[in-house]
């Protein structure tokens, strides 16, 4: 009799546990802050083609107008991830590891630069040597200033030959270049083409120095720790979308238009860049950017590459 009672109790417990257990794994929603930049194209394609759903993750895009707005909502935990640069991740992690890089987003390649140093049409500058001692408009302590300085150093410039001036807002930089009030400035693809269309001259770019001008996908570490499978699904979808964009970029002109990634005057002739396959920044790339931030006084401590760059979630 006792055995029978114990058996019945065990059956009831088992049934109770089964009733309490979820019948299916709940799909995680990742909130991604997105600037209107060409770097985001594979993300929008992944959404359009249903690739996030295919890989078991929901993705909600949160449009932002500027890098400070992006960083603010990340700091407030109102977004889970974004496209930014290693410099931004380092600044997030200066006291403790808040964010991790999980993938390259966009990396310059031959024929497809990411950043362009452009001389104003009124400047008379036509070669990179003409930039020696000339103030170049940049947003300070950002990847634009970093890439500008490193490109010119690679071209043989000494430190005292490189001059930059703070023009934080890209529309202001473009307007000052067009008017000739700014002799030179650094702009991203595809906005650089608008200034070139007004007579601006490209005198240098980062296509031969991809280690400086790349962007990354990063997520808050707490989100990665809580939902590693969702991040893996997100990255698998990005991988498929990247292959689709690279194979037939013209197919996604509608995305460029709808998401305002390319100005209307450029849309018809614009050729999207070649997007990188799965990979994360190297330790050398990380350390170079870190040393630059420390030289600028933006950081006073070392930020761990191992703790801040996570390549284990790539497909």
Image (tube, grey):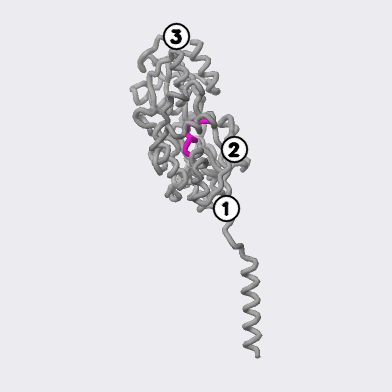
Q: For the residue carrying disc 2, how many other residues have a C-alpha within 10 Å: few (<14), some (14-19), or many (20+)?
A: some
According to the picture, the residue beneath numbered tag 1 turns out to be: 27
- Taking the image as shown, residue 247 lies to the left or right of residue 255, namely left
Disc 3 to disc 1, how far (Cα)? Answer: 56 Å
Q: Is residue 307 above or below residue 88?
A: below
Q: Give residue 157's position: percent from left, percent from top.
A: 36, 21
Q: Tell me what residue is drawn at x 60 percent, y 40 percent.
A: 75
Q: Tell me what residue is drawn at x 44 percent, y 16 percent.
A: 197
Q: Nearer the viewer, mark 3 or mark 2?
A: 2
Q: Give residue 262's position: percent from left, percent from top.
A: 49, 27
Instruction: Depth check: give the residue in front, 144 or 231.
Output: 231
Disc 3 to disc 2, how far (Cα)? Answer: 39 Å
Mark carried by residue 72: none
Q: Tell me what residue is drawn at x 36 percent, y 30 percent.
A: 209
Q: Give residue 24's position: percent from left, percent from top.
A: 58, 60
Q: Upstream in the sequence, badge 2 or badge 1? A: 1
Q: Upstream in the sequence, badge 3 or badge 2? A: 2
- Point out the image quarter for the N terminus: bottom right
Q: Is residue 226 above or below residue 254?
A: below
Q: Is residue 175 above or below residue 224?
A: above
Q: For the residue carrying disc 1, how many other residues have a C-alpha within 10 Å: few (<14), some (14-19), or many (20+)?
A: few
According to the picture, the residue beneath numbered tag 2 turns out to be: 62
- Taking the image as shown, residue 176 lies to the left or right of residue 152, namely right
Disc 2 to disc 1, how far (Cα)? Answer: 19 Å
- Mark 3 touches mark 2? (CB < 8 Å): no
Q: For the residue carrying disc 3, how many other residues have a C-alpha within 10 Å: few (<14), some (14-19), or many (20+)?
A: some
First to last magenta residue range? 36-42
Secondary element type, mark 3: loop
Secondary element type, mark 2: strand
- The answer to whether residue 242 is magenta is no
According to the picture, the residue beneath numbered tag 3 turns out to be: 122
Q: Upstream in the sequence, badge 3 or badge 1? A: 1
């Amino acid at each position: 009799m006792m055995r029978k009672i114990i058996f019945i109790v065990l059956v009831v417990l088992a049934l109770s546990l089964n009733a309490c257990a979820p019948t299916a794994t709940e799909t995680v929603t990742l909130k991604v802050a997105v600037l209107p930049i060409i770097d985001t194209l594979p993300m929008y394609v992944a959404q359009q083609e249903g690739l996030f759903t295919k890989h078991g993750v929901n993705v909600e895009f949160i449009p932002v107008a500027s890098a400070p707005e992006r960083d603010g909502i990340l700091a407030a935990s109102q977004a889970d991830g974004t496209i930014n640069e290693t410099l931004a991740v380092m600044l997030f992690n200066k006291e403790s590891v808040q964010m991790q890089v999980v993938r390259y987003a966009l990396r310059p390649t031959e024929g497809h630069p990411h950043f362009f140093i452009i001389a104003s049409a009124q400047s008379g500058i036509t070669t990179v040597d003409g930039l020696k001692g000339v103030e170049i408009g940049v947003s300070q302590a950002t990847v634009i200033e970093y890439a500008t300085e490193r490109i010119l150093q690679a071209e043989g410039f000494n430190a005292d030959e490189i001059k930059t001036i703070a023009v934080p807002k890209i529309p202001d930089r473009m307007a000052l270049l067009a008017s000739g009030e700014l002799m030179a400035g650094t702009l991203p693809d595809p906005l650089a083409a608008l200034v070139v269309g007004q007579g601006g001259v490209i005198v240098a770019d980062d296509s031969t120095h991809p280690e400086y001008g790349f962007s990354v996908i990063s997520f808050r570490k707490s989100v990665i720790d809580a939902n590693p499978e969702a991040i893996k699904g997100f990255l698998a979808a990005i991988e498929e979308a990247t292959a689709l964009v690279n194979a037939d970029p013209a197919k996604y002109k509608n995305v460029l238009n709808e998401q305002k990634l390319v100005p209307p005057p450029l849309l018809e002739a614009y050729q999207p860049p070649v997007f990188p396959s799965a990979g994360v920044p190297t330790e050398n790339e990380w350390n170079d950017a870190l040393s630059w931030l420390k030289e600028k006084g933006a950081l006073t401590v070392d930020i761990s590459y191992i703790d801040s760059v996570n390549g284990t979630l790539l497909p």
